[in-house]
Image (cartoon, grey):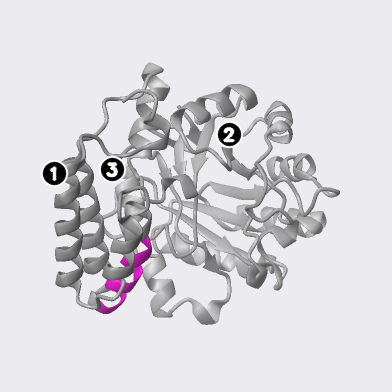
Amino acid sequence: MMQIGSYQLNAPFALAPMAGITDKPFRQICRDFGAGWAVSEMLTSDPSLQQTHKTLRRVDSEGESGIRVVQIAGSNPKLLAETAHYNVARGAQVIDINMGCPAKKVCNVLAGSALLQNESLVAEILHTVVDAVAVPVTLKTRLGWDENHCNILAIGDIAEKAGIAAIAVHGRTRAQMYNGAARYELITQLRQQIHVPLWVNGDITSPQKAFAVSEQTGVQGIMIGRAALGQPWLFRDLRHFHIHGVLPVALSVAEHAQVIHKHIQSMHDFYGEYLGVRIARKHIGWYVAILAGGDEFRRQVNKVVDAKQQLHMIDAYLDQQIKQLSVWPCTYRQNIQ
């Protein structure tokens, strides 16, 4: 089991923070399926935005199970420390610092992965935030800025010396964005170099791949991002494979349908009808992408603005799947059905 500060995780599998995705409803459903760690959407360190509706929703964890991990982003050490202190005072149990986001709007203000170009600033930020709060501080980052500047080994050394409690590394540079294949060789070297827990992230799309990457790198934990979209039950399969070396019996088609209904309903409840219907659309698209007629259904349901109608359409479509399918399609189960 992984130990992050005083917290012992019940499973070494984490849901990666993803802006606009890892809200409370999605974090909770992934936790329910076995994610031992789920990080909030990124919060800016700009104090003028702390009381906006968007920020307040992002920090809302009322009723959520598990360790509350709040991710913050920025480039000013003092503001980041103040943001960390502000969130701890409001219940954050762990602070995660974003130095991995490749988005232009983040990098253009020298935050996210842009910070990897300035190791002295990285050190100042990490020391300042760690010193500002009494809870564990973790770091999410990448291999480096580009192919010629893969400085993750130096960043890892800086982080450990600053007192960072755990590090998550996405196996790409910022220049790669999400293109090309994730690489794990430097993460393997980092694992041998540092003594704090390490997550590996990037292109881990199945329990089989998670096992292979874990064996290759020797890391303590696996962090899942895009692979969880449309299949939060992946965490159930990861956990079972980790313990038993085989995949569990798949959920029935009806059970998959129940999960999807519950998730969409929870978004309506969390955001209210207007936003809930609209935010749910992307998740519906991910859920049905693998199903026959999924693209056409997505186009039709995306025209709906009423929450009850949206749920009714989803239930009707899923009822068809229950009648027609013997198993829910899954790429990493294709050879064992």
Closer to viewer: mark 1 or mark 3: 1
Q: Amino acid at mark 2?
A: Pro
Q: How many marks?
A: 3
Q: Which residue lies under the disc numbered 3? A: 32
Q: Which disc, if any, is residue 304?
A: none
Q: Which disc, if any, is residue 323?
A: 1
Q: Residue at x 66, y 30 (%)?
A: 195
What is the crowding at mark 1: few (fewer than 14 residues within 10 Å), some, or many (at least 20)? few
Q: Amino acid at mark 1?
A: Lys
The picture places residue 311, in percent across and down from the top left corner, at 18, 64
* Marks 1 and 3, the one that precedes in the sequence: 3
Q: Nearer the viewer, residue 206 or 111?
A: 206
The picture places residue 198, in percent across and down from the top left corner, at 59, 35
Q: Residue at x 46, y 41 (%)?
A: 14
Q: Which disc, if any, is residue 197?
A: 2
Local secondary structure at mark 2: loop
* Structural distance between the alpha carbons of marks 1 and 3: 26 Å
